[in-house]
Every structure is written in structure tokens, then in C-alpha cells.
Image (cartoon, rainbow, N blue to C red):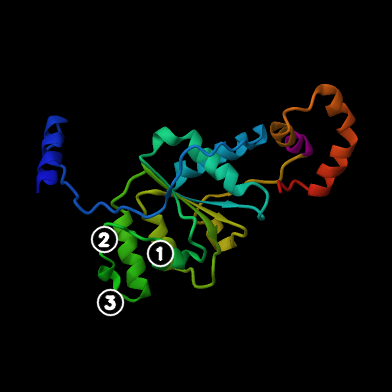
Amino acid sequence: VIKHVKHLLARRKNGNPEKPYDVYKPEIEGTKLGSTGYFVPNSRDNVFKAFDEGFEKSNVIFVTQMSGYGRKSAARKYVEMHAEEYDQRLVLHSFSGTLREFFTNGLVISNINENVFENLDENKTILKKAQLLQKLDQRTLLVVPNVNIGRRDDTLVFDSLSGLGCRVMFIVQNVPQRIRGLFPVIDVGRLEDRHLRELFFNYYTDVDEIEQEALEQPLNRFFDSLDGHTT
């Protein structure tokens, strides 16, 4: 009650006393994203721009490319770059599954008693959790890094995602055509040799110009073998 009164007084002070106070604003369990310390080559600037454009169109975007091409590092770096825009920045590391399973198993709301969902079937659980997430706004960003889009991910799931109040970035390997018409899909692409070089010398900083010249050809052969891969 005291907490409720304090919020009402704060809103009155700010000139908005009539906006209803929502005691049940959901709190999502996840790992808080702070500074990553990741180095991301300049070539990712176009990817970050695509993330911005995607979020202008939808609260949900899909980031795609095969594993090992820097999808997760680009996503986490983007969150770090925009940290001041979000009150909550969470990554759901422990989840791996389909979009349907994201709602039923991966999405844990810590300030809601799980008994609320006990007698609900799968579809009603999805609808209930989606309804709760409508209470959040774009100051919350979730990064879900291990998603596979399954055959049972249907219109109910897609409609539920479309109504979320928070922003969600799903990181996937493959995006079916049926998703591409509903949500922005950003392909991070493969790194060019010159960008792999930039990445390499960011970590091996004690190499001088003469040594860099001596490494030119061996590195070119090495980068060719990577085919844009970062690991």
C-alpha cells in the first residue's frame, strides 16, 4: 500500500495523477547485460543501423546467420551502445528452443506466482504471458540467443509476439519465409578479409608494422580459409 501511495504522489507531482498504477508490472528473469568489452569491426555499422531500422518497424526483430559469424557479439555490442535507452537489458542465456517454447518455458516472470499458469493449456499460457508483457514498454530489451523456429510456431505465437510492449531480439540460424513477412529479419553477413584483419590485430596489439608486413601473405591464406567466420 505504501509503495502504491508513493507512486500516486510521484505522478501527481509530475502532473499525471490519473494514470493508473500497475502493481503487477512483470519482472523477467534473465542475465543483466552490462558492458561486454567486445570489439566489433567497423563493418558492423551497417548491421547496427539495420537493428535500429528494424526496431522502428517492430518491437520484435530476428537476427540471423550461421553460428560463428558474430551474431551474438553484434547483438550484445548493439545493446551496450544503446544502454542509456533501456531500463532493463536482459539476455536469456539458459533458454534454447522454439518460439512457442520461449513463451511456455523460457519466459519466467519472477513477480508472478507460477500457479497462475498451472491450470492453463499451452495456448492459454502463451496468451497470458503475452498479455503480461504488454504491460512493459520499449525501455525493456530482451536478447534471446538460442532460438529455433519450429513447425508448431503458428499464428497464435506470431500474434502474441506482435503485441509485446517490450523489445525482443531473437538470434536464429534460419528464418522461414513465413516469418520474413511478419517481422524485420537482419542478416549480419560474413566478415570480409579486411575486417577479419581488423579483428585479428585488435587482439594482437604488440605486432609492429614490419611484423604486420611479414604476416601479410600467411594471414591472407588464413582469412581465406575462414570464409568470413570469426572462430
Mark before the other along the chain sequence, 1 or 2: 1
Visible in this render: residue 52?
no
**71 sits to left or right of 10:** right
The picture places residue 117, in percent across and down from the top left corner, at 29, 70
Q: Which residue is drawn at 11% across and 36% down?
A: 9
Circles 1, 3 touching at the beta carbon (< 8 Å): no
Q: Does the magenta stretch include residue 196?
A: yes
Q: Is mark 2 on a helix, strand or loop?
A: loop
| Residue highlighted by disc 2 | 112
Q: What element carries label 3?
A: loop
**63 sits to left or right of 58:** right
| Residue that extends furthest to the top in the rendered view of this protein | 209
| Residue highlighted by disc 1 | 103
**Residue nearer the viewer, 144 or 210:** 210
Mark before the other along the chain sequence, 1 or 3: 1
Q: Is mark 1 on a helix, strand or loop?
A: helix
Q: What residue type is labelled 3?
A: Asn
Q: Residue at x 26, y 70 (%)?
A: 115
* Residue 121 marker: none
| Residue that extends furthest to the front in the rendered view of this protein | 206
Q: Which amino acid does label 1 sit on?
A: Phe
| Residue highlighted by disc 3 | 119
Question: Over which residues does the magenta segment extend?
Answer: 193-197
